[in-house]
Amino acid sequence: MEASLSAAVSGINAEQTWLDAIANNLANSDTVGFKESDVQFSELLTQQVSGATAPVPPARGGVNPVVVGSGVSVAAITPRFTQGSITSTGVASDAAIQNNGFFVVNDGGQQVYTRDGEFNVDANGNLVTASGGLVQGWMATNGVVTPNGPTTALTIPTDQQTPARATSQIVLGGNLPSGATTPQQATVTAYDGQGNPVPITLTFSPSTTAANEWTISGTTTDPATGATENLTFTGGNPTITFGANGQVEDVNGAAVSATTPTALAFDAPAGYQFPAGATISLEVPPPNGAASMTQDAGNDSAGAVSQNGFQAGTLESYSIGASGTITGSFSNGQTATIGQIALANFANETGLADQGGGYYAQSANSGAPQIGAPGSGSLGTLTGGAVEASNVNMASQLTSMVEAQTNYEANTKVVSTTDGVLQALVQMA
């Protein structure tokens, strides 16, 4: 009698634990990065009534052992780390993990791990979880991230600046009109080392003695006096000659390369903040390309198509890429890498210790964290501006709830039935 009561009570307790897990799963069905848990049961130690006997030919056959189970226990409550759906939020600080991995977080000095990528930026520019944990990764040095070695807290300071860069290269392009007899002009704004704009006017003058030949000259304005200053080219003002097909054929009498730009240097203008002796390269692209300079019957469009200098800029926005790289966009039109988010993986992720709040901690059976950049090794990639939804399957959980309820009720029937048998025995006394 006591054995049936004990077994039934263990069944009631086990089913209650299952219901607790189901309730927790359903309660967190909208929790970002939540992973549903599954309860695993195990039979308790059985009681042996009699042992097995071997056959004794030819008089007797063998007899199987007689055992009675003593109930059930909860062997494990295991999280299911299946992929949740990726939901776009449009929030730049959010990130969702696709496939394997956990975000690495330092919360109060403890290193924990989470799939919840619903991050924020705090007053100090730190990238943090909803509970204030510091998201870990690697900060960039001069725009370069080295994703190895110890991780550190990631910061996205809104006052971050990119320094100005002096122009060292101007690339030509466009078209010079065939048959033109008057000079054609184009302007470009270059920058000195302090980000001051340097207005440059390039003049293309058609030759009066040689067909399809143009001479390039240039001027700028002295920032102190406003006077016009001629650009000084190395070896004098260069000439460009076009072939019958309208493509650049030679520069300064030398045939141009079919693959490499031809560089023409001029001295950096005086009066601006350039290093002593600095020059600026005026580049003519190779012929027969989409960016080649041409001479045909079209309109004049010749000029500078690009230059590599810029003013100082402040951070305006940022984004998180698939590799976890945080890229900042600055007011001067430049982009730069700010840092890179780290991910961790474990040999046995189901062995992690659930800390609550979406956090997991390393345990004796999880293995040590293997930390690296997203997309490297077995680690998954990130989707910026998105989060991973809970992986709770509502239909499955509701079905399990009905099953747990039925099993619970069946165990209570065993209790009531055993009670009735005991009452009958009492009445016989």
Image (cartoon, rainbow, N blue to C red):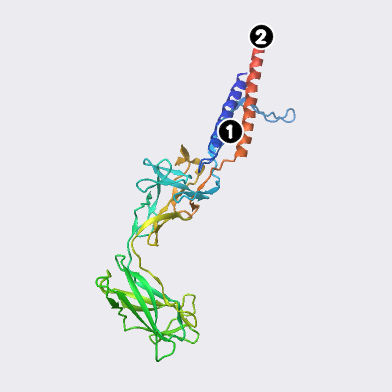
| Amino acid type at image mark 1 | Phe
State whether residue 17 is above or below residue 357. Answer: above
Residue 411 located left or right of residue 143: right
Quadrant of the rendered image containing residue 225: bottom left
Residue 57 can be seen in this image: yes
For label 1, count other residues whose C-alpha is less than 10 Å away and answer few (under 14), some (14-19) or many (20+): some
The earlier-in-sequence mark between 1 and 2 is: 1
User: For mark 1, what is the residue?
Assistant: 41
User: For mark 2, what is the residue?
Assistant: 427
In front of the other: 327 or 376: 327
Quadrant of the rendered image containing residue 340: bottom left
**Percent of width and height locating residue 23:** 56, 33
> Which quadrant: the N terminus?
top right
Which residue is farthest bottom? 209
Q: Secondary structure at mark 2?
A: helix
Which residue is farthest top? 429
| Amino acid type at image mark 2 | Gln
Label for residue 4?
A: none
In front of the other: 236 or 17: 236
Identify which residue is drawn at 34% across, 53% down: 159
